[in-house]
Amino acid sequence: MASREVVHYETPITKALRWFSVAFIIVYLIWTLLPILVMFASSFKDLLEAFKIPAVGDWAGIGVFFEFTPTLKHYNDLFANLNFSSYILNSLVAAGGSAVISVVLGSMAAYSLSRISFKGKNDLFFWIISTRMAPAVAVMVPLYSIFRSLDLVGTLPGLILAYTTFNLPFAIWILKGFFDNVPYAIEEAQMVDGATRPQALMAILPLVAPGIGAFIVLCILFAWNDFLFAAIIGSGGAKTLPVATRELVQPQNIQWGSIMAAGVVTTVPMMLLGLVIRKYLVTGLTMGAVKE
Amino acid sequence: MTDTVLSDQSIPGQSQGLFRVRQITDNVEARPVPSIATEPKLNPPASRAYFFGLMAPAIALLACISLYPFCWLIYMSLHDVEIGSAVWNNFENFTKLASDSRYLNGWWLLIQYSVMCLALQIGIGVFLAVALNGARFEKILVTTLLMPMMMAPIVAGLVWYFLYNGTFGWYHWLLQSVGILGPKSILASTGTALIGIVIVDVWQWTPLITLITLAGLKRVPQDQLEANMVDGASQVRNFFAITLPNLYPVLVIAVMLRFMDNFRFIDSVLALTGGGPGNATKILPVYLFEVSFKFFKLGRGAAIALTLLVVTIILGMILVRVFDRQQTRKA
Amino acid sequence: MAKVSFRSVWKKYGELAAVKDLNIECADGTFLSILGPSGCGKSSTMRMIAGLEHISAGDILFDDQRINDMAPRDRDVAMVFENYALYPHKTVFENMANPLKLRGQSTDRIRERVNAAANLLEIGQLLRRRPQELSGGQKQRVAIGRAIVREPKLFLFDEPIAHLDAKLRAHMRGEIKHMQRTLGTTMIYVTHDQLEAMSMADLIAVMHDGELQQLGTPREVYNQPVNAWVAGFVGEPAMNFLTCEVQARRDDVLLTHSNFALPLLPQQVQRLNGHAAGPVRMGVRPDGLSITMRKPSEPVITGEIFVNELLGGDMIVDVQLADARIRVKTAPEFEGVPGEACYVTVNREKWHAFDVENGRAFF
């Protein structure tokens, strides 16, 4: 449908609109990329160079942004003095753990929900999705007090569980849509051919595997980027990258160089993963309501 | 059976006007057969243990980490909660909210914040999508746009905190050079701080609106556009008459999602202002965070959380309804 | 190979009964076609046989063994699905090998069986392809191939050729029939296309609204429909129905209509069995009528030509009567022109009369 060739007839208005669109796209790209560029550049700058800025109104002075000798000292600092390698590990374990739990349990539940109907299914479904939509802070108030009594605060298992509160409902909801798209007839054919129910499920797994993979990645992304849960539930023993980055902001001494380097370390893996699952991003970020 | 015959000359004397519509009564299939009245004795129902078994672990886990905390939240909201103790306080947590100016202000700020974010994101996002749709390099451009969304909100907040800095922030320099802003950072004065956090949200999440709109644009039925064009509409009119109404459902979804996310995430606000200066950016979730995890008034926090939760659930119900309508339309 | 029996089988979805009190005996080696419009319960019936749906009430037996509670894999049936249900990520060979593999057959045996089936269906050259690289007809052959690699007790075909184009459909009808004859396996074939059922089946079960209407050979179903619904559903072009009055006049019993009054044959009068006067629905197939432009001497129906449809070897003429239209099959040389008066004679051996109230056939 989209590939059909549409004829355009130019009028002065459409022509003007077109030029305006191009200009708008260019301006928007600059504004969207600049903060990322500043983060990258500043992470390689000495602090004095990073703080260099032209006088107000001195448009020609923009060039000072590019005047610096690249240094890796902030990155060195992160790993040599600030213990960032262990925070990376924490982030990985917490995000990965909750993603795997969520997607494994979630796809089992999603598959069943997709294949049978029963009384109260819609209510169950709404409960699942509302769990996901609840404000993080609101969820955290009782969760914190429960986890404290269970000694889970400040531990990785506690953080993994906390992330599962939003990743599991997400996985169930999204993967159900996925299983709904696999014709039941394929499993039926398998069963008539002589497969048991579990064997039939295994047979359709290759069809949903790319999606399941993508949603593991998306769950990792949500958990990795989280700050609130990590700051409260993970505080102390299970410090993750976002929390560690934020802690570099101290009232008297904001370590901008390290912050920018930490920002790069936190962001780059997710940007790459985002590219890998590009196809599923819109579906994932809109809870399956919009498909590309 | 009703037959429509597009000619009026086949049977003389029977034509009535341009189109002849004639009722044919008899040449129909015969009536239905009488149905069997007796009710059967049913076999034992099919076992669905397999499916419920597969579902059980996820549901059980979810109940432990969401349903149980929810009940706990209600319990807490009715008590004075100290570390290790809880005392019934006769709904005081709730009654106090009514006179808590920071609580009410929190709602007002949250609404202001959300409306500003949404208006800008929808405006810019939709225009950008229309501009990008079918453009050269569309794929690469869209992929580039994704970058801010992948960034942890707390990191985005910190980077923008740097950019907004009154002495060395590039963004501040830009605003100052253009003449919009004085020497004081946008985040430092109560009048502009809210706009400061709105800008960051717009920066990070406008691409999502663009992506959603693009997906919607790809599904605008070409034949409708073509039919309208043949009927004599210009491209601009076509956009308003066909494209926009077709986009409406996805836009509703986009608005709802962003609205709820503004309730859910406060990471970047915490990094940028922490609610200040004064209470200028203390939107409700930030206030809730402060009450619960700075002053550790967990009972009070629970009451606030409950009110926030109720509003979110209502929004969620509306959203699910919209989802369903989309699904049925597809089917 | 097996005999299949339905004993008072019901399928209920909540309060809704999709199949009601179904009783069929299908002897070993029979080609049974379950025929009916969509929503008549024929697919539910098939899925109950396969074990894909729970049997709400009653029993299904294979060779007198109750199979209600058996898993699909234990029933030893092979099924061809309406949408083929091929595994998209597997090659044609793997698709066809699947049932054998699931039953733990040796690699050599699998290769031998798949190749034999592929040869029978003339798809040997496609074995390495994947389903999305195949045309509809090829996919359909693969689906059949998957069913015949094994030697099951029973074949279940669920509208397997509904999605093919008309020419290929006609070709496949012959092939499926031939294949079933060759293998001698009992076959249950679900279709909404009466032509498929008529041309292939040994036995047709006509279903409507979840109820079995008639169980009989194609000839019986076509020539002696038990009720007006079956009569109207089977046959293309469809049977003509006219509401007539039964009137006794001197020695004759007449069927009268505003356009005609025709006497019944003596044995038909007998079949009317007391329904001496009053309305009946008269039904006659287009091939039970003949049309002329010149008034013949015998009793006729007088009408006006509405339109002619030339179907190559035949011509169908729509004739306008006072309050109805009937279709008549005639030779393509027929020269009537729309708008002209014409005369239709009825082959009274071939007409039917149905009860106006319940549709039951008198003759």
Image (tube, coloured by chain):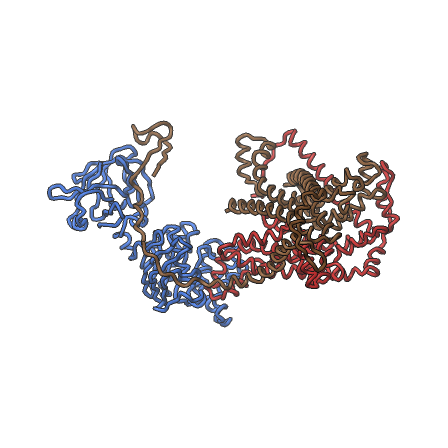
Chain colours: A red, B brown, C blue
Q: Is residue A146 above or below residue C325?
A: below
Residue lying furthest right in this view? A48
Quarter-wise, where is residue B179 in the image?
Answer: top right
User: Which residue is located at x 70 percent, y 49 percent?
Assistant: B288
Front in this rendered view, residue B181 or C315: B181
| Residue at 52% across, 65% down | A199
Q: Is residue C328 above or below residue B20?
A: below
Compared to residue B19, the image places residue B38 above or below, namely below
Query: Would residue C309 be seen by someone viewing this image from the given angle?
Result: yes
Please name whichever residue, C154 or B124, is drawn nearer the observer in this view of the structure.
B124
Point out residue A49 in the picture as x, y percentages from the top left corner. 87, 48
Q: Residue at x 33, y 44 (%)?
A: C312
Location of the N terminus of chain A (image quadrant): top right
Left or right: where does residue A74 sit relative to residue A228? right
Residue B270: percent from left, percent from top: 75, 48
Depth order, front residue of C361/C219:
C361
Could one spot residue C97 in this view of the protein? no
Q: How many marks?
A: 0
In the rendered image, residue C119, in percent from the top left (x then y), is placed at: 44, 63
Give the image location of residue B9, x and y in percent. Answer: 33, 29
